[in-house]
Image (spheres, rainbow, N blue to C red):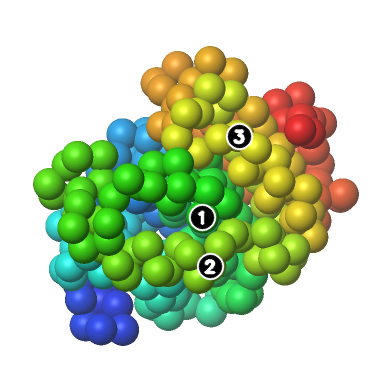
Amino acid sequence: MWTELEITNREGEKLEHAFHPGSTENVLVILGHGLSGNKDRPLLVALANGISALGWPCLRISYSGNGGSDGDFTKSCPTKEIADLQSVLDLVPHEVRVAYIGHSMGGAVGVLTAARDSRVHGLVTLAGMADMVGFLKREFSDLTPGAGFMWDDESLPYSQIFADDLTQIENTFSAAEAVTQPWLVIHAADDDLVPIQDSRDAFAKAGGEKAWLEISHAGHSFDESSHPQIVQAIQEWLKTSLHFPLKENPYSPVLAQIISTP
């Protein structure tokens, strides 16, 4: 289905995607990238390859205005990406259980979507952005919206739409409280773009079943040496979130060995 399917958002913009088949029936893992990313970021490719090899069908997507998807990057913001993700969910058959894995701003999109959309059955955030206003102040306080470029990259204009959307959202903490789906929070100790405290604070607010994994000696995008550990953790979490209640999960002893609390 997903290999040949054309995906468009509610504005008619085509969203590029790549599908990795898996042997498990009636599940789909959707992977979303962070700010300025796309479906082909090495982290997403590595995770999709690893998870699908373990039997989980995976769909990598590029949000509108990013990668090969239609749309204007200056209109990219969490609110629009939530709508993009919901357009993908609109195409998922009702019997299919969906887990969403989001990196950085894509993690925030996952939290904000899961808080309002029960079609997300399990959630994983990787270096998830939570304090939106703090991020803007750290990274772009010297820029004027509409007149500068993110990280001095002329392909990444700093737009008023983006700045206003993050300012209006402010943070994902109230959304975290509303997330009732099983949620795995993963962050690297040496992340210098989205501080690990963002994930710690979101984890503390989370209202449902949750687990925490801290990756040592890795940065915001993690690295190849950390990919196997992340894949293993997600594998056990998917067994939990898509098949079993956490407290009754027969895989929980394995999960406990790789996941701690902050």
| Residue at x 43% of width, y 51% of height | 136
Q: Secondary structure at mark 1?
A: helix
> Relative to 255, does residue 35 appear above or below in the rendering?
below
Mark positioned earlier in the residue sequence (3 or 2): 2
Going by the numbered disc 3, the residue's amino acid type is Ile
Q: Is residue 207 above or below residue 141?
A: below
- Going 66% across and 32% down the picture, which residue do you hit? 213
Q: Which mark is residue 196?
A: 3
Q: Residues within 10 Å of mark 3 (few under 14, many from 20)?
A: many
Which residue does the numbered mark 2 point to in the structure image? 169
Q: Where residue 50 sits: x, y (%)?
A: 43, 34
How crowded pointer 1 is (Cα within 10 Å; few <14, some 14-19, many 20+) is rated as: many
Disc 2 is placed on an element classified as: helix
Q: Position of residue 99 (x, y in %)?
A: 55, 58
Quadrant in which the N terminus is drawn: bottom left
Instruction: Tell me whether circle 2 and circle 1 mark residues in contact (CB < 8 Å).
Output: yes
Q: x, y percentage for residue 170?
A: 56, 62
Q: What separation in Å lies between label 3 and label 2 (alpha carbons)?
A: 19 Å
Front residue (pair 188, 8): 188
Q: Could you give the CA–CA distance between mark 1 and mark 3, rounded to whole angstroms?
A: 14 Å
Q: Which residue is mark 1?
A: 132
Which quarter of the figure has residue 157? bottom left
Q: Residue at x 48, y 65 (%)?
A: 167
